[in-house]
Amino acid sequence: MNLEDIKNMIVGDIVFSSNVGETLKKWRIIFKVRQKELAKAMGINQSMLSDYENGRRRSPNIRFIRTFVESLINIDTNKGGEILKKIVNTSSSDYFERKNFSKSITIREFIKLINGKTIVDTGNMDYPLYGYTIVDSIRVILEMPLDDFPLLFGGIADRAMIFLGVSTGRSPMVVIRVAPIKPKVVVFLNLDKVDDLAKAIAKREGIPIVSTSLSIDELRSILSKI
């Protein structure tokens, strides 16, 4: 992933987010930049940036978003590029793989495509999805540095999260419960009996849980065509 790819990924995450202000704030925090410092780099008042982050202004235009992203990257580059390096490394991580769809599909359409069985139905099956993340749940829980979790949930926010190596579903849902950005649907491979706490978290967070009997290679093949 080169610098232009990173810029486009962050811009896309913000533009397609269901809460633009929250996503602006998420990326500012990921880059460890204070509001005042970022506003100065963007050439705007801090109050304007604060208003956007907290939803007191209508969503910004694409020019503002690109300036926001460019400024974050420039600030990080001037500090040695610590966060940029982490994004590059995490985006090609052994812990997970992340792909975006060429067009949006609804959760309902997604479940049908993967021959999924709905374990928890939260009633928001017509919500659009713009991509997916496949997660090696055991490695993420045991090995992945805590600072990298925001990057795991980055990319495009409105996505499906597909977990490998799940025995009950409890641990992944506990991680999601405390994550800064939530997936729109969770998929477990070959898991029909899901832990009661996992189900309770899914209902509380409004995240459907789906199980599929397809192999991970079959899933990749199907989802690559969207």
Image (cartoon, rainbow, N blue to C red):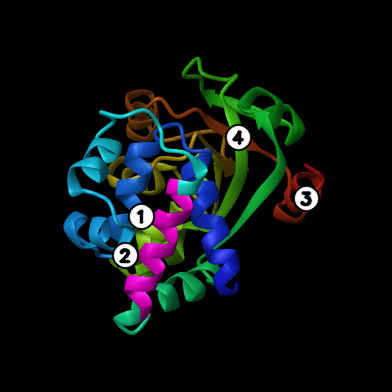
Q: Quadrant of residue 164?
A: bottom right
Sequence-earlier tag: 3 or 2: 2
Residue 176 visible in the picture? no
Residue 59 x/y as whole percent: 40, 32
x 36%, y 67%: residue = 142
Sequence-earlier tag: 1 or 3: 1
Q: Which residue is mark 3?
A: 224
Q: Which residue is mark 4?
A: 129
Q: Amino acid at mark 1?
A: Trp
Residue 198 x/y as whole percent: 37, 35
Tell me which segment is drawn in magenta: 64-77
Sequence-earlier tag: 4 or 2: 2
Q: Which residue is mark 1?
A: 27
Q: Amino acid at mark 4?
A: Leu
How far apart are labels 4 and 3 at the CA level?
Answer: 14 Å
x 24%, y 36%: residue = 51
Q: Does 34 appear above or below 26?
A: below
